[in-house]
């Protein structure tokens, strides 16, 4: 889902410079990279691993298989 944010002309120019420097195809990717560096939130917390299965009832109860 796309949305619009308002930034100053200076900020837009800085984003454009970073976009070209990083050879990125969008401002979104530039902003995402900046946020990843600053916030250091694990991608697993942001749904970045779509193949990761959801928790089951057993997971929530703390029932685990022996290795």
Image: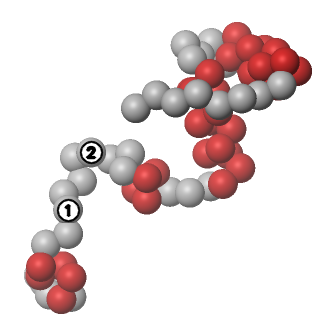
- Where residue 38 appears, x then y in whole percent? 71, 50
Quadrant containing the C terminus is: bottom left
Q: How far apart in space, not on screen, are marks 2 and 1 (Cα)?
A: 10 Å
Residue beneath disc 2: 50
- Where residue 53 appears, x then y in whole percent? 19, 57
- Where residue 26 appears, x then y in whole percent? 57, 17
Quadrant containing the N terminus is: top left
As drawn, the label of residue 54 is 1
- Camera-nearest residue between 20 and 65: 20
Q: Is residue 12 left or right of residue 26?
A: right
Evaluate whether residue 67 shows in this view.
no
- Where residue 21 appears, x then y in whole percent? 73, 14
**Picture residue at 68% right of the left edge, 16% below the top:** 19
Classify 10 Å Cα crowding around label 1: few (below 14), some (14-19), many (20 and above): few
From what the image shows, is residue 24 above or below residue 8? above
Classify 10 Å Cα crowding around label 2: few (below 14), some (14-19), many (20 and above): few
């Amino acid at each position: 889902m796309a949305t619009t944010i308002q930034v100053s002309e200076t900020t837009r120019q800085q984003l454009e410079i970073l976009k070209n420097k990083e050879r990125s195809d969008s401002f979104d990717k530039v902003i995402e990279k900046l946020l990843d560096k600053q916030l250091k939130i694990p991608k697993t917390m942001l749904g970045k691993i779509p193949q990761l299965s959801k928790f089951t009832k057993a997971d929530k109860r703390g029932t685990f298989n022996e290795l």
